[in-house]
Image (spheres, grey):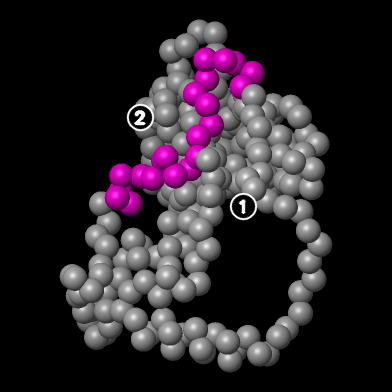
Amino acid sequence: MKKRLIEYHSIIKQLPAPLPAKKFIPEWYKQIPSFSNSNIQYGSNGGIVKSAKNCIPFLDSLMSGYIVQLAVDVVVTDYEGSKDNKLLKWNHPDFEPVGLRGKEPNESLPTPAGHTGQHFVWKTFNIFRTPSGYSSIVTHPFNRFDLPFTTLSGIIDTDSVIQEGNLPFYIKRDFTGVIEAGTPIYQVIPFKRESWTLRENEDLGDLANQTKFGVRAKNFGYYKNNLWKKKDFE
């Protein structure tokens, strides 16, 4: 199958290049036990125990699209001892990875729970371009709740928008320390723009029951071996 091309350009040549998300599988995911017919365990409800390692949709979210990394270490401290105000610093004198927006334009924007109300932005020095008819989801790295910040999400028509910009994020209120260079700060997933309409189909209930029987007939791997379609991002 022919591969679509997503192009990028870094305004600053020394920046780390965006990379396929599959290169950023977090260590905590690797440490999650995976159950199979060779190590079956049963839970308190009598059913077979499965983990996130057995959930292919969860893994797909970690491996889809491309990751942009933080280019330099960023030190986060409490400003004047207040957890509600963070001070961000970095050592590089000629590079500004982060900005801070004033409150006025974003007063009505809800703050994620557990974060300060400060509206920081990642300075985005990477420009992406997709083929005609394709846009990109730009979002916090999927399922990376371990990160000390939350990046907001947006959809950009990357077949026509050719410029760098700013990507908002919030810092977790209880975090102080170093966000290290190489940390994934946002995920870019290209998709084709199409027109859709929504309607109910009562036949889907019967189809779901058929699938459910197949899933329960096998201890492990039914979805992966019978329903899953491989996604390829290089």
11 in relation to 37, above or below: above
What number is the disc on residue 86?
none
Viewer-side residue, 76 vs 226: 226
227 in relation to 229, above or below: below
Where residue 151 sits: x, y (%)?
A: 55, 41
The residue at 61%/22% (across/down) is 10
- Which three-letter amino acid code belongs to the residue tagged 2? Gly
Where residue 8 sits: x, y (%)?
A: 64, 29
**In the picture, residue 188 is in which quadrant?**
top right
188 in relation to 69, above or below: below
Image marks 2 and 1: residues in contact by CB distance under 8 Å: no
Q: Is residue 140 magenta?
A: no
Question: Within 10 Å of the Cα at label 1, are there few (<14), some (14-19), or many (20+) other Cα atoms?
Answer: few
Confirm whether residue 209 shows in the render.
Answer: yes
Where residue 1 sits: x, y (%)?
A: 62, 52
The residue at 40%/75% (across/down) is 222
User: CA gap, disc 2 to disc 1?
Assistant: 45 Å
Element on which disc 2 rests = strand
> What are the residue bounds of the magenta stretch?
10-30
Whether residue 87 sits left or right of residue 103 in the image: it is: left
- Which three-letter amino acid code belongs to the residue tagged 1? Met
Residue with the mark numbered 2: 177
Confirm whether residue 84 shows in the render.
Answer: no
The residue at 52%/26% (across/down) is 17
Element on which disc 1 rests = loop
Whether residue 39 sits left or right of residue 169 in the image: it is: left
Question: Within 10 Å of the Cα at label 2, are there few (<14), some (14-19), or many (20+) other Cα atoms?
Answer: few
**In the picture, residue 66 is in which quadrant?**
top right
Viewer-side residue, 73 vs 204: 204
Q: Tell which tag, 2 or 1, sits nearer the viewer.
A: 1
Where residue 35 sits: x, y (%)?
A: 25, 67
What number is the disc on residue 1?
1
